[in-house]
């Protein structure tokens, strides 16, 4: 009961669900690895909680299932006319990465079924944003619309699926608005996890529209199925605002359910959709039935980060890609360096098949293949680094064993997460087990092969989210359940940071924002020039600075100068402890 009250509208009433802090994880910053994993399990389980009378619609609500059926029928229409029609999946950050992940997966599945591919993706910031943190393009509605226009040039019918977990990204709002202005070609679908009235109400840069005004227009059109809203509430994220977690998982579940239903030769039914959704709940429970092993892994990753070393995910196929996605989000969420947690996938860009091809030349963070790992990372590996192998029995287990041997020569701190279907274990698997200091063996019972792959992917996503979030918590990058060292690289993150400062320091809104600006520009007095700069300039400048929010907080709590705050943080690099020390003395 308490749990339901705390998820309801009257708890932190001014915040949308996706920005609220979750009462279940208030003490996650002081928890052991095994308690962290249990708290994450409880938060993830909220995704499937059924609706209470006063509550918002949920993942399994009748309205949501019905909308999924309608959207699946629309995808079917597109399948019948692949020449002139298209489905476009789009989003920013993790939502854009998942748009890419699913568009490629669905096209592959279509090819397997002898259909023409029908899906394209658009990610804010282009392909470099697939595995590096690029938050700024998220604020550009015009760019969003332009990218959508370009990718769908010449098509007569386009189903546009825009994902913004917080119903907040201007890039997606611009795309939805473009669809609404061209209804002859475009049908917009919005996926997000707040009720419509909580959509962001701040004017989009460069125009008078807001995300909320776009949603209101869509709600009107939804009555005649000219637009669709899929926006169940999932409960607040375990780390406040970290929509890559439940938001990302639910995005994957919803879109896979829609596409599986439309690809199937049997009619789309309410019960079929509902059952499919429930099977993900089983996958979630099954994943967390390994929570002790996940905790062991989290602890190992936490130890590596604590001593300034790194965690590498070495994956195969789509599981490897999920490793890249998980790693890329650590920078904006925890102020991490790209080298702290890194993903590598067998086959690199060939495996991905992304729009812009091989990006290796763009810089070291774009080296993503196992060969890159062997050339650039392996020679420097020590016992303090953690390596995690991610694969399944459909991958080349010989190749996994070979790589495991190479890594084991450098460090005993090698672990594996292996998915297999009921049945015997290959000899190479025994070999790998012996090389690894821990192995999580997920043994799935027989399902249809495609569903099984989706379940393994969700399971891998949950595991990786737990490892990277847990490791950063153990490193002291979280205070209570707030990301206190987030990057302030777009307007949403800027507002979140200002709110967090206000909440933790109990200073006024304007004092908190001033402190944030001082930390961004590294000054003790704000000049007229700074005060009149655009938000865009603030977030751009913040992208070049480090520990902006901790600096601002120390200044607010102690009244010290930026220089003094820097010295304090140098002496106490564990952000959580620095914050606590200031709170005690303030
Ligand atoms: C998009 C997003 C997140 C990321 C970060 C910045 O959010 O890029 O994926 O974690 O918080 O925003 P949304 O539009 O899906 O709400």
Image (spheres, rainbow, N blue to C red):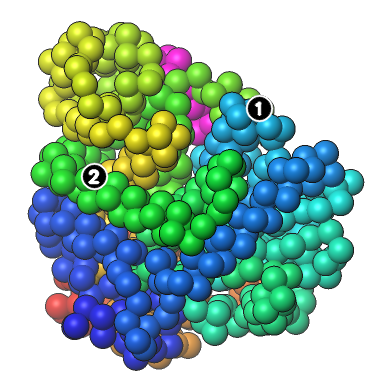
Where is residue 461 drawn, in percent x and y?
36, 44
569 or 394: nearer the viewer: 394
Residue sitting at x 56%, y 66%: 67
247 or 503: nearer the viewer: 247
Residue sitting at x 23%, y 26%: 422
Q: Quadrant of residue 455?
A: top left
Range covered by the magenta-colored residues: 364-377
Q: Which mark is residue 570?
A: none
How packed mark 2 is, by other alpha carbons closer than 10 Å (few <14, some 14-19, many 20 or more), is many
Where is residue 203 drawn, in percent x and y?
67, 80
Nearer to us: label 1 or label 2: 1
Residue sitting at x 81%, y 53%: 157
Q: Earlier in the sequence, mark 1 or mark 2?
A: 1
Above/below status of 120 relative to 484? above
Taking the magenta stretch, the answer to whether it contains residue 328 is no
Q: What residue is shown with label 2?
A: 287
The secondary structure that dominates the magenta segment is helix
74 on left or right of 518:
right
Q: Secondary structure at mark 1?
A: loop
Q: Quadrant of residue 27?
A: bottom left
Q: What residue is shown with label 1?
A: 114
Image quadrant containing the N terminus:
bottom left
């Amino acid at each position: 009961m308490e749990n339901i009250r705390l998820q309801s509208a009257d708890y932190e009433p001014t915040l949308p669900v996706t920005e609220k802090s979750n009462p279940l994880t208030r003490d996650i910053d002081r928890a052991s690895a095994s308690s962290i994993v249990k708290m994450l399990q409880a938060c993830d389980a909220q995704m499937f909680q059924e609706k209470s009378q006063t509550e918002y619609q949920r993942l399994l609500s009748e309205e949501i299932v019905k909308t999924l059926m309608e959207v699946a029928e629309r995808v079917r229409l597109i399948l019948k006319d692949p020449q002139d029609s298209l489905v476009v999946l789009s989003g920013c950050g993790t939502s854009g990465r998942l748009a890419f992940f699913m568009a490629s997966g669905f096209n592959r599945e279509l090819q397997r079924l002898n259909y023409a591919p029908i899906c394209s993706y658009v990610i804010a910031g282009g392909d470099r944003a697939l595995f590096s943190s690029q938050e700024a393009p998220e604020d550009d509605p015009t760019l969003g619309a332009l990218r959508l226009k370009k990718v769908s040039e010449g098509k007569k019918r386009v189903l546009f699926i825009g994902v913004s977990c917080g119903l907040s990204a201007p890039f997606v709002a611009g795309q939805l608005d473009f669809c609404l202005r061209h209804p002859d070609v475009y049908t917009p679908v919005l996926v997000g996890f707040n009720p419509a009235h909580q959509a962001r109400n701040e004017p989009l840069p460069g125009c008078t529209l807001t995300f909320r005004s776009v949603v209101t227009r869509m709600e009107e059109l939804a009555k005649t199925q000219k637009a669709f809203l899929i926006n169940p509430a999932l409960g607040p994220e375990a780390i406040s605002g970290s929509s890559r977690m439940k938001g990302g998982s639910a995005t994957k579940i919803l879109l896979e359910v829609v596409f599986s239903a439309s690809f199937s030769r049997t009619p789309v039914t309410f019960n079929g959709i509902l059952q499919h959704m429930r099977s993900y709940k089983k996958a979630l429970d099954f994943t967390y039935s390994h929570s002790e092993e996940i905790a062991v892994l989290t602890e190992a990753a936490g130890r590596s980060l604590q001593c300034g070393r790194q965690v590498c995910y070495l994956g195969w196929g789509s599981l490897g890609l999920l490793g890249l996605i998980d790693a890329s989000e650590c920078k904006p969420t925890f102020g991490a360096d790209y080298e702290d947690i890194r993903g590598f996938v067998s086959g690199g860009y060939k495996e991905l098949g992304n729009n812009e091809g091989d990006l290796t030349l763009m810089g070291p963070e774009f080296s993503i293949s196992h060969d890159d790992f062997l050339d650039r990372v392996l020679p420097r590996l020590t016992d303090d680094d953690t390596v995690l192998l991610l694969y399944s029995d459909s991958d080349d287990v010989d190749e996994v064993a070979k790589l495991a041997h190479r890594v084991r020569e450098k460090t005993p701190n090698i672990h594996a997460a292996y998915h297999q279907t009921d049945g015997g274990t290959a000899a190479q698997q025994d070999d790998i087990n012996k090389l690894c200091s821990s192995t999580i063996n997920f043994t799935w019972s027989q399902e249809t092969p495609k569903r099984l792959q989706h379940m393994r992917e969700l399971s891998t996503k949950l595991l990786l989210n737990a490892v990277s979030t847990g490791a950063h918590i153990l490193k002291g990058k979280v205070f209570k359940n707030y990301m206190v060292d987030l990057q302030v690289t777009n307007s949403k993150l800027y507002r979140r940071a200002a709110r967090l400062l206000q909440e933790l320091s109990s200073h006024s809104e304007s004092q908190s924002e001033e402190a944030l600006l001082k930390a961004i520009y590294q000054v003790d007095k704000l000049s007229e020039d700074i005060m009149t700069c655009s938000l865009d300039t603030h977030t751009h400048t913040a992208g070049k600075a480090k520990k902006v929010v901790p600096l601002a907080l120390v200044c607010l709590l102690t009244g010290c100068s930026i220089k003094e705050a820097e010295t304090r943080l140098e002496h106490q690099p564990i952000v959580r402890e620095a914050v606590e020390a200031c709170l005690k003395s303030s």
